Image (tube, rainbow, N blue to C red):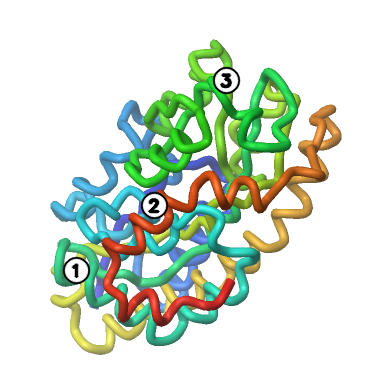
């Protein structure tokens, strides 16, 4: 059976997500299926967030996107955005490969037109800025910061005294360059690939959120496939998920090395306890919105 799919993202070829998307397409092609990859729809004049409508409507088949953007529709996805909750990636992704992941996949399917094919590693998120070292929450006071389209993210940075601004990925590098914002937060690989070190000489490795990207498919398209083809599709997705996480873990060190080579100063002696205390109320309010059964499936840290 000759089947063709489309797979799209919002980052360049160097991205760990785009590389995994290419791997997914190659895995399908090895089984005689065709997948056309559009690595970065913003290069076509689209906003990155257009991917949700494109995929849910059937214009596109498969996509990746930071889970935070879907949390308004699936509140349990806020588990990834509990500020200063996680201290490493291994425990969380082990949980996502078990009952926690199964529960979240079911909720996404119930509340959207998507099927979750995998949970991708979007990296621990760290602060950079153009003005000063950030060691404690008081150093954040008054800094404007670019954020994702996430109320929880915005509440977190506001609790630190910052002024949050949601800016789409398409416009975010320009906002850093022209100083529309003073600060941004991203995993090392995105900070590097979007050219931020040229404009932000200060980095604090806060790891305030453990980023997760959802690898999503149009659920109606997936469910309509013959059983054998659906199995091939899911096998390709599983393989892409495994290699994406490998890419992401490796990229942390390589990207940080490159960032440092550009003269960025890292604040190592930042006060984690003070940041946790400053954002405790935000974290508690978010936990109150999340199903307690899901909270019970989270790793300790």
Circle 1 is placed at which residue position? 219
Circle 2 is placed at which residue position? 65
For residue 174, say whether it is visible.
no
Q: Which mark is residue 182?
A: 3
Q: Which mark is residue 115?
A: none
Camera-near label (3 vs 1) is 3
Place of residue 265 in the rendered image (x, y in percent of width and height, measured from the top left): 82, 31
Q: Secondary structure at mark 3?
A: loop
Mark 1 crowd level (few <14, some 14–19, many ≥20, 10 Å Cα): many
As measured in the structure, the alpha-carbon distance from the residue carrying label 3 to the one carrying label 1 is 40 Å
Depth check: 47 or 277 in front?
277
If you read the primary sequence from the N terminus, does the residue marked by circle 3 or circle 1 appear first? 3
Is 58 left, or right, of 167 in this rendering? left
Depth check: 284 or 5 in front?
284
Q: Is residue 61 above or below residue 115?
A: above
If you read the primary sequence from the N terminus, does the residue marked by circle 3 or circle 2 appear first? 2
Determine the residue positioned at 58% across, 55% down: 123
């Amino acid at each position: 059976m000759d089947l063709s799919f489309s797979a799209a993202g919002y980052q360049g070829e160097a991205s760990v997500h785009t590389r995994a998307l290419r791997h997914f397409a190659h895995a399908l092609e090895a089984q005689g299926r065709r997948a056309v990859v559009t690595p970065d729809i913003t290069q076509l004049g689209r906003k990155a967030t257009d991917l949700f409508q494109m995929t849910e409507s059937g214009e596109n088949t498969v996509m990746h996107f930071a889970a935070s953007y879907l949390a308004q529709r699936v509140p349990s996805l806020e588990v990834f955005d509990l500020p200063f909750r996680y201290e490493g990636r291994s425990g969380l992704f082990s949980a996502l490969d078990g009952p926690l992941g199964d529960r979240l996949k079911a909720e996404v399917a119930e509340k959207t037109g998507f099927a979750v094919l995998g949970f991708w590693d979007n990296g621990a998120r760290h602060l950079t800025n153009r003005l000063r070292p950030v060691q404690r929450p008081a150093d954040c006071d008054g800094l404007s910061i670019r954020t994702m389209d996430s109320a929880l993210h915005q509440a977190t940075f506001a609790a630190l005294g910052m002024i949050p601004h949601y800016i789409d990925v398409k416009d975010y590098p320009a906002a850093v360059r022209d100083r529309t914002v003073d600060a941004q937060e991203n995993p090392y690989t995105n900070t590097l690939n979007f050219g931020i070190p040229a404009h932000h000489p200060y980095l604090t490795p806060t790891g305030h959120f453990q980023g997760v990207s959802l690898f999503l498919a149009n659920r109606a398209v997936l469910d309509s496939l013959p059983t054998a083809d659906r199995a091939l599709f899911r096998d390709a997705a599983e393989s892409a998920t495994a290699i994406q996480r490998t890419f992401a873990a490796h990229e942390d060190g390589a990207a940080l090395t490159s960032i440092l080579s550009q003269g960025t100063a890292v604040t190592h002696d930042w006060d984690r306890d003070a940041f946790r205390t400053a954002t405790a109320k935000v974290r508690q309010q978010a936990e109150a919105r999340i199903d307690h059964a899901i909270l019970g499936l989270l790793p300790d840290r």
